[in-house]
Image (tube, grey):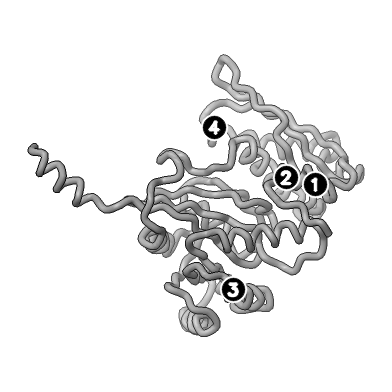
Amino acid sequence: MSDDDAQSGSAMMPPRRCGFVALIGAPNVGKSTLVNALVGSKVTIVSRKVQTTRALIRGIVIENNAQIILVDTPGIFAPKRRLDRAMVSTAWSGAHDADLVCVLLDARAGIDDEADAILTKLGSVDHPKILVLNKIDLVPREKLLALAQAANQRLKFVDTFMVSALSGDGVDDLRRALAARVPEGPFHYPEDQMSDAPMRSLAAEITREKIYRHLHQELPYQSTVETDSWTERKDGSVRIEQTIFVERDSQRKIVLGKGGATIKSIGADSRKELTEIVGHPVHLFLFVKVRDGWGDDPERYREMGLEFPKE
């Protein structure tokens, strides 16, 4: 091949693109499920309990010549306590810092009070906005079209997509559109890296998800999990020690369960999923401790990637 041929061949290659895409929406609209569907692997905690995504956990998607960095923000809701305010502040900072903003609406709920407040506030965000109607498999087509029209009348969207994050319907089209819209530029992350959340953090998120799944309404979402140690052993297995922090001794007893049955079930479920992700046997050791007033401790907020609200 001549130098001219090589140059003409490289000129045919489309330029690389890379950008941050923030997913904004009320709690439980399906942001975390959509991130996992777009990436094709589990990178964020998915729970029926609201406000489970505390920090800006990113999923990384490679689509053709583009790298899409997904910012899965905490659900935006009316904050009541300090932790709530930190989460909402983090969500809005994610929207302002991104190259594109995906606004998720639950097709069943439509433009309810929470969605209405989000659409109003998004008027101050300058970045291009894409409307994503999720859970479309649960709603008649006429209602979807009416909802899309109503939302576009409220806010200027550059595009509208209808998806089911759970089934994957419409997700490929959305992924391709995001790849085409992120700005030109070099990739920020290695091509084989799916998430910039360190494995310790992901391990803690997985255990926290199992706590929600087992305890549902019995334990407030203030509970947190920290990965204390992560040791790779000579036989290829990984030893992980984690501490589950709760605010009261009564909550500690709930997590432990009768004869330690609940903590054993949580540990077994978390160990199974961690083994699949790590690709090696995992030895998981869980401890439960009471940390009174951790919701007002600035250090805990920093560990979760949140800014500590002064008031």
From the image, tell me which residue sits under label 1: 298
Residue at image mark 2: 302
Q: Is 166 located above or below residue 200 in the figure?
A: below
- Dot in front, 1 or 4: 1
Closer to the camera: disc 3 or disc 4?
3
Please name the residue shown 79% across and 51% down the image. 222
Q: Name which residue type carries label 4.
A: Val
Q: Are marks 1 and 2 in contact (CB under 8 Å)?
A: yes
Inspect the image, locate mark 2, and give the three-letter code of the amino acid beneath it.
Arg
Q: Is residue 51 left or right of residue 238?
A: right
Instruction: Determine contact: label 2, label 3, CB under 8 Å.
Output: no
Q: Is residue 231 left or right of residue 288?
A: left
Q: Residue at x 43, y 63 (%)?
A: 169
Q: Earlier in the sequence, mark 1 or mark 3?
A: 3
Q: Nearer the viewer, residue 164 or 155?
A: 155
Q: Where is mark 4, residue-wise? A: 278
The residue identified by callout 3 is 124
Q: Determine which quarter of the picture holds residue 269.
A: top right
